[in-house]
Amino acid sequence: MPDNLDDGPLYCQDRAAYIFLLFPSTLLLLRWWVWDGCLPALAVQVYQAWLLFLYTSFALRENVLLVNGSDIRPWWIYHHYLAMLMALVSLTWEIKGQPDCSSKQRGVQLFLRWAIMQGIAMHLQNRYQRQRLRTRIALGKAKRMDVVAGETAGVEGQLLLLYPVLFVLQGFEAYVGVLLLQTAWHGLTSEWQVVVCGILLVVMAVGNFVNTVETLALKLRFKAKMKRTRNRPDQSQGQGGPNRPHQN
């Protein structure tokens, strides 16, 4: 159970992050230990169906948050719409088996590796958001329906780890999308799902990168503003206000 009411939405995101991390990891391990290097179609499609459910629930929840006054960026809602579309398209993607299973399933394997990185990034984001949300609620600057964004405070260690992981994840997402498009371009596959999923991955990677950079720039500007605000009282004291000698 969540430790308090304010952590309710993040508690659900924590569970999703665990599944995001463990499900594809298990599939890739079983691929070598049990399935002789070839992923069964049913196992992959179960994961893709769960992704469709997950992104649909995320999109619905964020629309509710937006209606209730949350300051969530619109891009993340659009991102989940695109992810829903990709999950739906991937469910119709024929997963071929032997012979030459490794070559035929290369795109699926890359996607599962990206999903593992996504799970790690989700864990880091959830840790950061939980700490920031608690701080903002304690200061009276946020409600439990808010989404953490914009301001920054004493979690620099987490931010120094979170942002590089996010940028690596976005780069790998674009890389997987480009590989899928190259596979279709060179005639290695004729399935339209490969082209659609490749385009969607590239679009989401670019959109995520732009919004992450904008959020980081906003945090840096806020931090600089807070630093200037803290320095102003020191300057006024240096001009002799409270520190002037007492006169009879």
Image (cartoon, rainbow, N blue to C red):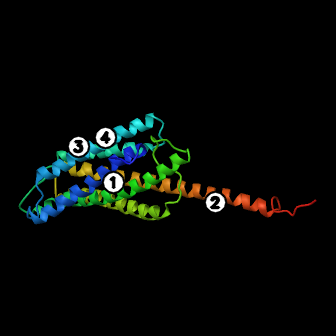
Residue with the mark numbered 4: 57
* Sequence order check, earlier mark of 2 and 3: 3
Q: Mark 2 falls on what kind of element? A: helix
Badge 4 marks a residue whose secondary structure is helix
Other-residue count near label 1 (Cα within 10 Å), few / some / many at <14 / 14–19 / ≥20: many
> Residue under circle 2?
227
Name the N-terminal-most of marks 1 and 2.
1
Are the residues flagged by discs 1 and 2 in contact, CB closer than 8 Å?
Answer: no
Task: Please state which of the two labelled residues, at mark 3 or mark 1, is closer to the viewer.
Answer: 3
Q: Earlier in the sequence, mark 3 or mark 1?
A: 3
- Provide the residue designation for mark 3: 88
Circles 3 and 4 in contact, beta carbons < 8 Å:
no
Residue visible at 82% across and 58% down?
Answer: 241
Q: Residue furthest right?
A: 248
* Camera-side residue of 3 and 80: 3
- Pick whichever of labels 2 and 4 is earlier in the sequence: 4
Q: Are marks 1 and 4 in contact (CB under 8 Å)?
A: no
Sequence-first disc among 3 and 4 = 4
Residue 185 in sight in this render = no
Name the foreground residue: 243 vs 114.
Answer: 243
Q: Residue 189: x percent and y percent?
A: 16, 55
- Total label count? 4
Please tell me whether mark 1 sits on a helix, a strand or a loop.
helix
What residue is shown at x 33% (from left), y 59% (from top)? 120
**Are there few (<14), some (14-19), or many (20+) residues within 10 Å of tag 3?**
some
Label 3 vs label 4, nearer the camera: 4
- Which quadrant is home to the C terminus? bottom right
Judged left or right of residue 221, residue 66 is left
| Inter-mark Cα distance, 1 to 4 | 23 Å
**Disc 3/disc 4 C-alpha distance (Å):** 14 Å
The residue pinned by badge 1 equals 202
